[in-house]
Image (cartoon, grey):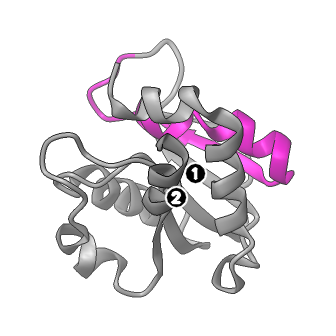
């Protein structure tokens, strides 16, 4: 498994606590949906639903076969304010595609930000690759908190 698996499950309470702490940031106070994509983005969702009480919504990556649809979770189609949870940004393609899919499928949804909970083992976390698509929202990282936890 990837770095996200080690980070999330070696200290689950601390990681989920750090994400919930970020959800309490003033810029995220209106969030009423937590969105994840792929295994790394959806793994923390159930923990976050339990700790925060905020609705969750999971998207499958495009290349993942399923007997169901490409998304699941709260069936809300009306307005909502969401935050994206993911492990890290490597190329930015996943987050950029996700925001595009949400904008097309749920035009009344508003992105409030992104929370990252791990770091890339290969290239590091470069947020430059998503700057154009996410320039209107804050991108948070709990990497510093995770670094403190692993020492």
Q: Does 42 appear in magenta?
A: yes
Q: Residue furthest top?
A: 67
Name the residue at 25% across, 59% down. Answer: 125
Q: Residue 22 lies in what quarter of the image?
A: bottom right
Disc 2: which residue: 84
Name the residue at 47% across, 44% down. Answer: 151
| Residue 23, position as x, y percentages in the image | 69, 67
Q: Residue 110 lies in what quarter of the image?
A: bottom right
Q: Residue furthest left?
A: 123
Disc 1: which residue: 35
Calculate the distance from the C-alpha at mark 1 to the C-alpha at mark 2.
5 Å
| Residue 9, position as x, y percentages in the image | 56, 26
Q: Does 90 appear in magenta?
A: no
Name the residue at 61% across, 73% down. Answer: 108
Is residue 43 at all visible to an observer of this figure?
yes
Name the foreground residue: 79 vs 95: 95
| Residue 92, position as x, y percentages in the image | 23, 58
Q: Earlier in the sequence, mark 1 or mark 2?
A: 1
Is residue 77 at all visible to an observer of this figure?
no
Residue 123 located left or right of residue 100: left
| Residue 114, position as x, y percentages in the image | 48, 66
SS at mark 2?
Answer: strand
Q: Which residues are magenta?
A: 38-65
Task: Tell me whether the residue at label 1 lies in contact with that at label 2, contact meaning CB atoms closer than 8 angstroms.
Answer: yes
- How many numbered discs? 2
Name the foreground residue: 1 vs 37: 1
Name the residue at 34% across, 85% down. Answer: 135
126 vs 76: above or below: below
């Amino acid at each position: 498994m990837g770095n996200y698996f080690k980070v999330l499950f070696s200290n689950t309470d601390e990681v989920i606590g750090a994400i919930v702490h970020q959800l309490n940031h003033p810029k995220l106070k209106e969030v009423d949906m937590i969105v994840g994509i792929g295994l790394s983005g959806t793994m923390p969702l159930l923990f976050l639903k339990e700790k925060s009480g905020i609705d969750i919504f999971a998207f499958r990556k495009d290349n993942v076969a399923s007997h169901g649809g490409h998304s699941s979770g709260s069936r809300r189609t009306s307005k909502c304010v969401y935050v994206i949870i993911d492990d890290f940004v490597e190329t930015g393609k996943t987050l950029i595609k996700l925001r595009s899919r949400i904008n097309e499928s749920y035009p009344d949804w508003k992105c409030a930000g992104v929370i990252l909970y791990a770091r890339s083992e290969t290239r590091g976390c470069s947020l430059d690759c998503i700057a154009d698509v996410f320039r209107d929202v804050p991108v948070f990282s709990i990497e510093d908190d995770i670094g403190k936890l692993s020492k």
